[in-house]
Image (spheres, grey):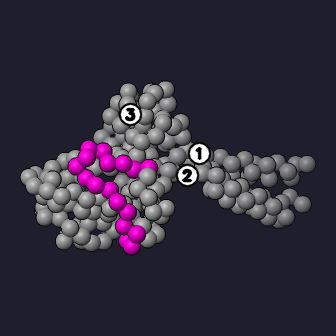
Amino acid sequence: MMKLIPCLGLAVALVFSANSYGALIDSFEDGTVDPWHVETGIATLSIDATDGSDGTHSLLVTRINKGGWFQDWAWEFPPRADIEFNSVLLWDIKVDPNDINGTFVQTTPIFNTEFGGFLQGPDILVTVDNEWHTYSWDYTLFKPGFVGLGGFFELNFAGNTNNGPKDLIYRVDNVRLPLTIPEPASLVLVSVSGLLLVSLKRRRSCL
Ligand SMILES: [Ca+2]
């Protein structure tokens, strides 16, 4: 009987290790812009089916004859209790030097709610070299999961290039928003892995 206690402890540890795992991810591999939409009408959104950092598809953001700081693309959904309060938002961007006529490009992440507030991340300089690069924001939300705020919760991104009439075309892929609850597929994977480990542990030390 005493030998079972370490095995139960291992199982509990595996369950807890799953609790800070998972993310809302969009890698655009379904070939649609959805759930993203144009935020300010300055840009148009489409899918590039030939160029992705994760898979083969990415979101193509196109601004023609528009310079300056604008919110380009956004993902709107009801407030969720499972969005990590303090974590890291990640996204990939690729800019071909031939696709801009300004001298710099910036990306800025924003959390926005209909009634509960607006939290803006830093303006991050984008590398313009026709390669994929990952950008990140270490954020702390003003209310965990935005639950109770009502209305919508929105993750949106602003792009920036020189003021005045400028063209800016860039690709986005692999947007990752951390969740506290594992995705079903991850949960199954962790559970199966956990059962296998527990089974092995029992074979080695519990029987
Ligand atoms: Ca992709």
Q: Is residue 92 above or below residue 19?
A: below
> From the viewer's perspective, is the residue at label 2 or at label 3 nearer?
3
- 158 is within the stretch colored magenta: no
Task: Say left or right for 139 vs 12.
Answer: left
- 40 is within the stretch colored magenta: yes
The residue carrying pointer 2 sits among few (fewer than 14), some (14 to 19) or many (20 or more) residues within 10 Å by Cα, namely many
**Callout 1 touching callout 2 (CB < 8 Å):** yes
Expressed as whole percent of the image width and height from the top left, the position of residue 20 reads 56, 47
> From the viewer's perspective, is the residue at label 1 or at label 3 nearer?
3
Mark 1–mark 2 Cα distance, whole angstroms, equals: 6 Å
Task: Say left or right for 103 vs 197.
Answer: left
Among numbered discs 1 and 3, the one appearing first in the sequence: 3
Q: Which residue is mark 1?
A: 181
Label annotation for residue 22: 2
Label annotation for residue 113: 3
Question: What is the three-letter code of the residue carrying label 1?
Answer: Ile
Q: Is residue 85 above or below residue 127?
A: above
Image point (43%, 30%), residue name: 151
